[in-house]
Image (spheres, rainbow, N blue to C red):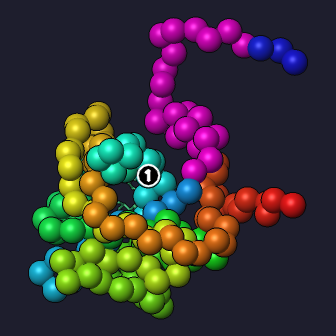
Amino acid sequence: MTVTPLTTNQDLDAARLREAFGIFPSGVVAVAAEVDGQRVGLAASSFTSVSLEPALVSFSVANTSKTWPMLRRAGRLGVTILAAHHGDVCRRLAGPVEHRFDDVPLTATDDGAVTLDEGLARFDCSIYNEVEAGDHTIVILELHAVEHSDTSLPLVFHRSAFGRLAASA
Ligand SMILES: Cc1cc2nc3c(=O)[nH]c(=O)nc-3n(C[C@H](O)[C@H](O)[C@H](O)COP(=O)(O)O)c2cc1C
């Protein structure tokens, strides 16, 4: 195997970066809320756990997002870890806003956090901090409630495609 040396001053163009970042597999979450009586949300693969005390998670949102300015006004945000069968649901959550929640059973809390009933884990969150980071904003969320009874496999996003984990023996 020939190993190319890592050289500085490379042209880190977006397509090349996207390809390299996509090598790292991730799960996908739905971030959703009811704002002014409307359901708003998006799919995010940048979700990660951050802290146990206080209980924090994060995701990064593109500064071009039209949904985030609305979502961030919600008192509470719902975060749902998508299941392996949620590929179409995920595509819809990233597509035209008027169809994002088509054909998907949802529950909203009194405070407006919206979660998907068939998610593997559901979190009720509020915004803890927002950190500017280049063309994205890192959103840190504080958890207020967690529910995770489902033991099915998660949706996996890898190299711009959906895959699934092999069930362990
Ligand atoms: C698998 C997948 C993962 C995504 N992850 C992110 C993400 O982490 N951050 C983000 O800002 N957008 C992400 N998106 C795109 C958003 O879901 C959404 O399409 C985008 O925010 C544009 O819609 P908006 O203008 O309504 O926000 C992802 C889309 C897909 C399909």
**Residue 75 visible, this orientation:** yes
Q: Residues within 10 Å of mark 1 (few under 14, many from 20)?
A: many
Locate the C terminus by quadrant.
bottom right
* Three-letter residue code for mark 1: Phe
At 55% from the left and 75% from the top, the residue drawn is 149
At 46% from the left and 63% from the top, the residue drawn is 29
- Asked if the stretch drawn in magenta spans residue 5, the answer is yes
The x, y position of residue 83, in whole percent, is 59, 71
Locate the N terminus by quadrant.
top right
Span highlighted in magenta in the image? 4-26
Can you name the residue that lies furthest to the front here?
53
Q: Which residue is mark 1?
A: 47
The x, y position of residue 108, in whole percent, is 29, 83
State how many labels appear. Answer: 1
Q: Is residue 128 left or right of residue 114?
A: left
Note whether 95 is above or below 103 in the view shown: above
The x, y position of residue 92, in whole percent, is 46, 76
Q: Main secondary structure of the magenta part?
A: loop
Q: Quadrant of residue 138?
A: top left
Q: Is mark 1 within 8 Å of ligand 1?
A: yes
- Asked if the stretch drawn in magenta spans residue 71, the answer is no
**Residue 59 visible, this orientation:** no
- Element under disc 1: loop
The residue closer to the viewer here, 106 or 71, is 106
Ligand 1's quadrant is: bottom left
Note whether 23 is above or below 46 in the view shown: above
Note whether 130 is above or below 16 in the view shown: below
Q: Is residue 127 left or right of residue 50?
A: left
At 61% from the left and 65% from the top, the residue drawn is 155
